[in-house]
Image (cartoon, grey):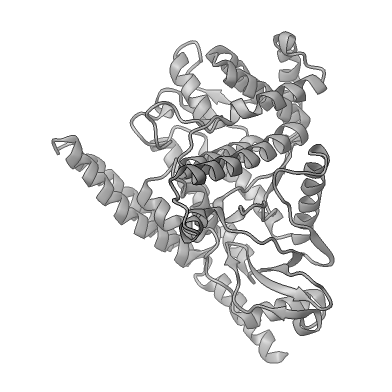
C-alpha cells in the first residue's frame, strides 16, 4: 500500500506541479501571445497580397500553424485548457485545421497511471478494486480534463459498468488556468472580440467546482434521467446512464455502461459497415440523431430548466454522458428564453430586442438602428441555423454580427444555454445539416409560456412584469 500511496502522491504532485502556478502562467502567456501575434501579422500580410485565392491559402497556412500550437498548449498544460479545446474546436466556430486537431482532445486527454487509479478507488470506496470488480480494464476507454473512465464488471453482476475516476491534483491547476483565461478574455474583449467574454469565463469558473463532486453529478444524472422518462412517457429520445448507488463518492462514480459509438467516430463506423458517410442512409441516421438530441435539450431547457450543459461530441453516443456540468435555470430565465425562441421564430428584430432586454443582454446597437445585423446576431447566439452562405460563426471574421452589434454585457446565468446552442450547431455543421433548433423548439416554448399563464397573444402585456422579476432575481443573486 505504501508504494501505491507514493505513486498517488507522485501523480498528484506531477499534475499539480507539472508546471507550478507561475510556470503555468508563463507558459500560457508565451504560447497564447505567440498564436495571437501570428494571426495579427497574417492579417497585415494578407492586405498586401492580391487575389482572393492567394489570401485564402495564406489564411489556411496560418490556421494549420496555429492549430498545432493550440493543440500543444492544450495537451501539454492539460487542466482547463482541455475544456477550452472542447468549446472552440467546433466546425461552425473554428477553422477546419483547428477542428481536426482539437476534436481528438474530447476524450483522448493524458491518462492517470492505472496504479494511481487503483489507489483512488481503494481510498474512496474503502475496498480494493479486485474485491469489488470481477473484471476491470486497465486502459481507460476515455480520458478528459477532470477524470478518466474504465470499463468494468461488478462481482456477481451480468452487465458491465463504467467507472469514472478523478485525476489526482487537477482541481488546483484548473483554477490557475481560469485566472489566466479571464485576463486574456478581458484583453480580447477590449481589442478584438466585441462580446462580454469576462462574464462567460466567470460563469465557467463557478461551474468548475461542481465538476469535482461526483455525488452531485450522480444526482443530476438521475434527476435528468427521470425527467426525460416522465415527459416522454417512458420512451426518452436519448438514454441517460443509471448511477450505481453505494459505489459513488466525490472522486469515484460507478454507473451503467452504455454500448455505442461516439458521434465523433460515426462516419468511420458507417464506412466499416459499408455505408457511405455522405449517402442518403447516413444522412437519415444523422438527422434522426440530431432530432433526438434537439428534442431532449428543448425539453430540458424549456420544460424543466435543469439541463445537461456539456453536449460536446465526446459526451454523445446514443446516450448523453458526463453530467459534471449541469445548469438549473430559474423559472424567470427559462420563460424569458422561451419568449426569445418565439421572437426568433417570428424573425422580428424588435421582438428579439425586447427579449434581449428582458434577459439582461445589453448591446451597443439597438434593434431599430440595424435590424438585419441584430437579427443575425441573435440567430448566431441562440439558434443553430447559420445564415445563408455562412459556414463558420467566427467572432473575429469580417462579416461577424458582433462588429455591427457589440454585446456590452451578457448574463452569466445564460452562458450554458448559449454554449449548448453553439455545441449543437457544431454537431449539425459537422454532420452537414443546417437546421433551426428555434423552429424545433417553438411548440415547447409555447407550452412553457402557456403553462406559466403567459398567453402568447398577450405576451407583450406581460413583458414589463417579467422584466421586473428578472431585475429583482439578479439583485437577489448579488446579495
Query: Which residue is the extreme one toward the right?
Result: 246
For image coordinates 50% across by 50% down, the residue present is: 181
Q: Quick one: 167 or 438, which is closer to the camera?
A: 438
Question: Residue 394, image x and y in percent?
Answer: 41, 37
Q: Is residue 109 above or below residue 343?
A: below
Q: Is residue 364 visible?
A: no
Q: Quick one: 475 or 410, which is closer to the camera?
A: 410
Question: Residue 207, image x and y in percent?
Answer: 66, 49
Q: In which image quadrant can residue 303 be found?
A: top right
Q: In which image quadrant can residue 199 be found?
A: top right
Of the 4 image quadrants, the one containing the N terminus is bottom right
**Left or right of 264 in this view: 326:** right
Of the 4 image quadrants, the one containing the C terminus is top right
Question: Residue 171, image x and y in percent?
Answer: 63, 63
**Left or right of 73 in this view: 261:** right
Q: Quick one: 285 or 325, which is closer to the camera?
A: 285
**Left or right of 116 in this view: 18:** left
Q: Quick one: 164 or 213, which is closer to the camera?
A: 164
For image coordinates 65% across by 41% down, the residue present is: 292
Query: Which residue is the extreme one toward the bottom?
Result: 2
Q: Is residue 6 visible?
A: yes
Count every numbered label the image shows and give the total: 0
Question: Residue 316, image x and y in percent?
Answer: 61, 52
Amino acid at each position: 500500500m505504501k508504494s501505491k500511496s507514493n505513486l498517488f502522491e507522485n501523480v498528484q504532485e506531477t499534475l499539480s506541479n507539472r508546471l507550478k502556478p507561475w510556470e503555468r502562467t508563463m507558459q500560457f502567456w508565451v504560447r497564447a501571445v505567440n498564436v495571437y501575434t501570428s494571426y495579427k501579422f497574417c492579417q497585415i500580410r494578407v492586405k498586401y497580397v492580391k487575389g482572393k485565392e492567394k489570401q485564402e491559402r495564406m489564411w489556411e497556412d496560418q490556421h494549420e500553424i496555429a492549430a498545432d500550437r493550440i493543440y500543444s498548449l492544450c495537451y501539454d498544460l492539460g487542466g482547463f485548457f482541455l475544456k477550452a479545446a472542447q468549446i472552440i474546436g467546433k466546425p461552425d466556430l473554428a477553422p477546419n485545421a483547428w477542428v481536426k486537431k482539437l476534436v481528438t482532445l474530447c476524450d483522448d486527454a493524458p491518462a492517470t497511471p492505472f496504479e494511481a487509479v487503483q489507489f483512488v478507488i481503494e481510498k474512496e470506496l474503502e475496498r480494493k478494486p479486485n474485491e469489488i470488480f470481477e473484471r476491470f480494464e486497465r486502459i481507460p476507454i476515455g480520458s478528459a480534463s477532470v477524470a478518466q473512465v474504465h470499463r468494468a464488471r461488478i462481482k456477481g453482476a451480468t452487465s458491465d459498468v463504467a467507472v469514472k475516476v478523478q485525476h489526482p491534483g487537477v482541481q488546483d491547476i484548473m483554477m490557475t488556468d481560469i485566472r489566466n483565461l479571464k485576463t486574456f478574455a478581458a484583453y480580447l474583449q477590449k481589442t478584438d472580440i466585441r462580446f462580454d467574454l469576462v462574464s462567460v469565463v466567470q460563469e465557467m469558473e463557478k461551474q468548475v467546482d461542481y465538476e469535482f463532486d461526483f455525488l452531485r453529478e450522480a444526482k443530476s444524472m438521475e434527476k435528468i434521467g427521470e425527467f426525460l422518462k416522465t415527459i416522454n412517457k417512458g420512451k426518452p429520445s436519448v438514454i441517460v446512464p443509471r448511477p450505481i448507488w453505494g459505489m459513488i463518492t466525490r472522486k469515484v462514480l460507478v454507473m451503467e455502461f452504455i454500448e455505442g459509438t461516439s458521434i465523433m467516430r460515426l462516419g468511420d463506423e458507417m464506412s466499416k459497415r459499408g455505408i457511405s458517410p455522405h449517402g442518403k442512409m447516413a444522412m437519415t441516421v444523422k438527422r434522426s440523431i440530431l432530432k433526438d438530441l434537439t428534442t431532449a435539450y428543448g425539453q430540458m431547457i424549456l420544460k424543466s430548466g435543469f439541463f445537461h450543459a456539456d453536449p460536446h461530441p465526446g459526451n454523445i453516443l446514443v446516450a448523453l454522458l458526463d453530467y459534471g456540468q449541469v445548469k438549473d435555470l430559474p423559472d424567470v430565465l427559462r420563460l424569458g428564453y422561451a419568449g426569445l425562441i418565439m421572437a426568433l421564430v417570428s424573425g422580428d428584430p424588435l421582438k428579439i430586442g425586447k427579449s434581449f432586454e428582458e434577459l439582461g443582454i445589453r448591446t451597443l446597437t439597438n434593434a431599430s438602428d440595424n435590424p438585419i445585423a441584430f437579427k443575425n446576431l441573435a440567430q448566431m447566439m441562440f439558434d443553430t441555423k447559420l445564415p445563408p452562405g455562412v459556414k463558420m460563426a467566427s467572432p473575429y471574421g469580417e462579416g461577424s454580427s458582433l462588429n455591427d452589434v457589440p454585446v456590452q454585457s451578457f448574463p452569466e446565468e445564460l452562458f450554458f444555454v448559449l454554449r449548448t446552442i453553439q455545441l449543437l450547431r457544431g454537431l449539425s455543421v459537422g454532420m452537414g445539416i443546417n437546421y433551426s433548433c428555434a423552429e424545433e423548439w417553438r411548440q415547447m416554448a409555447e407550452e412553457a409560456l402557456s403553462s406559466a399563464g403567459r398567453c402568447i397573444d398577450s405576451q407583450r402585456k406581460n413583458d414589463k412584469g417579467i422584466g421586473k422579476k428578472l431585475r429583482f432575481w439578479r439583485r437577489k443573486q448579488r446579495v
